[in-house]
Image (spheres, rainbow, N blue to C red):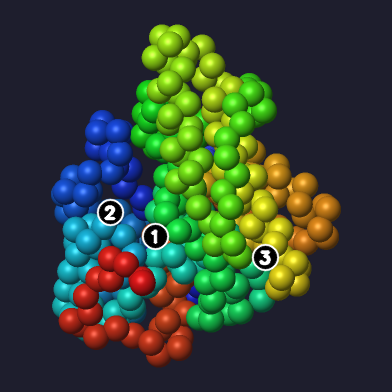
Amino acid sequence: MLADGRLLSNVVASQEVHAKWGGVVPELASRAHQEHIVPVVMEALDAAGLGKHDLTAVAFTRGPGLIGALLVGACFARSMAQALRIPLLAVDHVQAHIMAHFIDDGDGRPSPGFPFLNLTVSGGHSQLVLVRSPLDMEVIGSTLDDAAGEAFDKGAKVLGLPYPGGPLVDRYAREGDPRRFPLPKPAIPGLDLSFSGIKTAFVALVNREERYRPGFKEAARADLCASLQAAIIDHLMAKLRRAIRQYGVARIGVAGGVAANSGLRQRLQELAAREGVEVFIPPLAYCTDNAAMIAVAGRHLLEAGRTAPLDVVPLPRTN
Ligand code: KG4
Ligand code: ZN
C-alpha cells in the first residue's frame, strides 16, 4: 500500500511449494496465488491501517510471467477496481523491478537521478535498460536464452541444492576458488546476454566428474559454486562495462533477485570506483519480487492518466 508515494505496507507471501519440487511448477504457482491473494491483500490493508474503501486505485502485474499466476492477480484486481469503482493500473513486471529504486519507506536512501542504466537480473529476466524516466525505458540488451537467476538455480540444482539455489551458491562461493573450473565466456555480440552456454558447460562438468568420482560435487562444492558465480558475474560485468561506454551514463541501477548476490555487489563497487559511476542497489526485500515496486510503478501510470480498461488481460510475454 502506498499513500502519496510513501510505503505503508508491503506483504509478500512466501511460496515454499517451489522448494519442495525443486523449481517453479506453473500449476502449483497458480494455486498458491489463488490461496494467498485474499489473505495477503487483507494483511496489507491491516498493516497500513486502511480499509478497502480508502483505496483510490489498484495496481497489478500484467506480465511478463506465468499465465496462471498472472490470471489470478488480474482477475482479482479487475474485480476490486470494478467493485470499489477505482482506477485499475496494469504494471509491467520488469519495469516495476526498476521502480524498486524509488520505493520510499522513509529510510532516506538516495535513488538514481535520470537517466540511468539499469541491470535487471532475476529468475525470469536479464536486461540492460536505459531509464530516461519512470515511463520512458528502453531495453538495450536482453538475454537470448536463460536469465541470470535461472543459471544460478539450474547450476545449484545439479549440485543437489534446494530451490532457489542462487542464495546458496552465493554462500558456498565465498569459500571457494573461482578459477578452479573455468567455464566458457559467452560470445554474444552487442549488449545482449546469454547464460545457457555457462549452464550447459557447468552441468556437463559436474555430471562427468561425478561419474568418475562419486561424491565429487559435495567435495568440490565451494569451488564449483565460486566458478559458476564468477562466470555469470564476468559476463554481466562485461556487458555492463560495454553499455556504460556506449551510452556514457554516470549512474547504474541494479534490480531483481540476483542483485542480492554478494559477489556481484562487490564487483559493482569495484566498477563504480574504476569507471567513476554511481551504483544504486535497493534493499534486498525490494530486489526480489514484491508488491511495493508494483505500487510505485502503478502510481506513475495513474499520474500519467494511463489507467487500464476493466477487461484488460495478462501479457505472459512482452515480445
Ligand atoms: O526477482 P526475483 O525474486 O524473481 C523473479 O522475478 O524472477 O528473483 C529470484 C532469483 C532466483 O533465481 C534466485 O536464485 C536469485 O534471484 N537470487 C540470487 C541470490 N538471491 C536471489 N542469485 C544469486 N545470489 C543471490 N544471493
Ligand atoms: Zn521479478
Tag shown at residue 40: 2
Q: Identify the mark nearer the N-term, 2 or 1.
A: 2
**What type is the residue that disc 1 sits on?**
Ala
Q: Is residue 165 left or right of residue 229?
A: left
Query: Within 10 Å of the Cα at label 3, are there few (<14), some (14-19), or many (20+) other Cα atoms?
Result: many
Q: Identify the mark nearer the N-term, 3 or 2.
A: 2
Tell me the quarter of the image containing the N terminus: bottom left
Q: Is residue 101 visible?
A: no
**What type is the residue that disc 2 sits on?**
Val
Tag shown at residue 291: 1
Front residue (pair 194, 54): 194
As drawn, 8 above or below 208: below
Image coords of residue 108 (percent x, y): 66, 60
Q: Which residue is mark 3?
A: 243
Separation of residues labelled 3 and 1 (CA atoms) = 29 Å
Query: What residue is at 83 percent from the left and 60 percent from the top?
Result: 276
Separation of residues labelled 3 and 2 (CA atoms) = 39 Å
Q: Quadrant of the rendered structure where residue 125 is?
A: bottom left
Query: Within 10 Å of the Cα at label 1, are there few (<14), some (14-19), or many (20+) other Cα atoms?
Result: many
